[in-house]
Amino acid sequence: MAIRRVLSLSRSLAASSASAASLLSPGRNPSWGRDISRFSTAALTEEEVIIPPVQVEHTQLLINGQFVDAASGRTFPTFDPRSGDLITHVAEGDEEDINRAVFAAREAFDDGPWPRMTAYERSKIIYRFADLLEKHNDEIAALETWDSGKPYEHTANVEIPKMTRLFRYFAGWADKIHGLTVPADGPYHVQTLHEPIGVAGQIIPWNFPLMMYAWKVGPALACGNTVVLKTAEHTPLSALYVSKLFHEAGLPPGVLNIISGFGPTAGAALASHMDVDKIAFTGSTGTGKIILELASKSNLKAVTLELGGKSPFIVCEDADIDKAVELAHSAVFFNQGQCCCAGSRTFVHERVYDEFIEKSKARAMRRIVGDPFKKGVEQGPQIDKAQFEKILSCIRSGIESGATLETGGERFGTKGYFIQPTVFSDVQDDMAIATEEIFGPVQSILKFKDLDDVIQRANKSRYGLAAGVFTNNIETANTLMRSLRVGTVWINCYFVFDAAIPFGGYKMSGKGREKGAYCLNNYLQVKAVVSPLKNPAWL
């Protein structure tokens, strides 16, 4: 069953020994300026793609606590991005299956035990689920890596533990949600009730399937709602696996329903369903607009959106360049560059620009690309052929628009959807690689003169999801944190995703916040209750 592929490594500059990468003459485009090197990390070897240490157990839809086939009987394939080979076929949900799932969720909310049990009892079920996640951490991580291509070490040691932490965080919130007693101008007793919103529809992306599952399912269930969740068609497997564990923890039937399927069918049906009270979506800005339109044209359901970004990462002249290079590298190349808040516009002060370029190029060339199940691998494949080709097209656009290709720029190997870590310098604000969300391992490095210059340019984007600032000057940090029109500013750090830290965007990067206390408002209604007081002792 083992699939064989060649980890063919492209040739690189500056290495002269036989054990190093061979030389490449600089010359595909003499206008590039600097010598061009193609990415290389290891000796030329042939290896077997590692067989994932997990079996696919669940491929059906989960409706009303049972795994069932799609009403149509149709299935669709999910592929291993390391090779493009088939993993399995999964039930293809459509409008009829969304109807079945919403009916189950509505019945569970209107007549079932979940919103009627004490908040403490709900929290105990969520805590038990977190314990099961911890127990099955390695199997869950293997399934996630197999379906998405993200490095197993990070998935097992970081992502699944963070998912577990998120559910424990929201379990802790379940019995701390309450209203207020409000003073009024007159003899009235006024109180507010914080009530679950009802049936929540949720649509999650393929780049962080289980993290987004936790961001959405956790608060929805803690607040007493029921859920219909549509997985991304690229990565349907892990959500089905963990949802079975949720039912083992004691979750009542109908409270959590999982539909695998496609956006134009299952996703559109969920967003426009008249019996869904709220829709939450993470994905592209274009699809987010469609979700918002469908919600408004149906029953004006509440909407939260976590959408795209083109986040600035600002390196000031006083920065420790070595640390800044490493942080900027992580900010853009993490998760194969498939991250909505990637620091994909790297702004570097003109006084340290050249040094930063050379060190960023060297760091990218050291990045280890390969089978994500292999120890030490930093970068796996892109999710699928379409994304792979889109990224390569963006790279070609950068070259054609006059940016300098410092390293990378091509596919890695001969099989699967691997792309060399790519670094561009001399990038201008109007180039597509500086304005469009590439969602791949491509670093675009721009030069700036002063704070006024970089603030104006960083904010000149339709997106406003996140930003990074690297400086040793507290006044500079204070100026930038207040000036940047984004939902998160990381100062001398990046990708810090604590369960309690809210996350969301300005402008076309979304509506509402995920995580933390703020996200609970997405899944609650506030009801005011007023009653008269007769001869009150006090007001």
Image: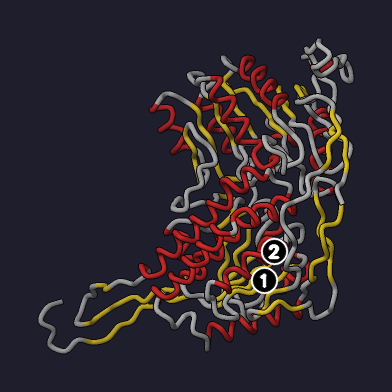
Whether residue 444 is visible, yes or no, is yes
Please give the name of the residue rendered at 78% of the width and 32% of the height, measured from the top-left corner.
420
Label 2 packing within 10 angstroms: few (<14), some (14-19), many (20+) = many
Indicate the position of residue 174 as horizontal and vertical percent values: 41, 69
Q: Secondary structure at mark 1?
A: strand
Residue situated in front as seen by the camera: 358 or 456 = 358
x and y percent of residue 153 in the render? Answer: 63, 43
Res 181 quadrant in image: bottom left
Q: Number of marks in the image?
A: 2
On the image, the x and y values in percent for residue 106 come to 59, 83
As drawn, is 21 to the left or to the right of 467?
right
Identify the residue at image location x=82%, y=34%. Answer: 412
| The C terminus: image quadrant | bottom left
In this rendering, does residue 438 appear at all? no
Residue 288 x/y as whole percent: 66, 59
Q: Which numbered dot is residue 538?
A: none
Report the front residue among 278 and 123: 123
**Circle nearer the N terminus (2, 1):** 2
Asked if the residue at tag 1 contacts the one at tag 2, i.e. Cβ–Cβ closer than 8 Å, the answer is yes
- Mark 1 belongs to which amino acid? Ile
When the figure is inspected, residue 325 is found, relative to residue 246, above or below; the finding is above
Residue identified by numbered label 2: 231
Quadrant of res 39: top right
Q: Residue at x 63, y 70 (%)?
A: 244
The correct choice, above or below, for 115 with respect to 137 in the image is below
Quick one: which residue is furthest to the left in this view? 537
The circle drawn on residue 258 is: 1
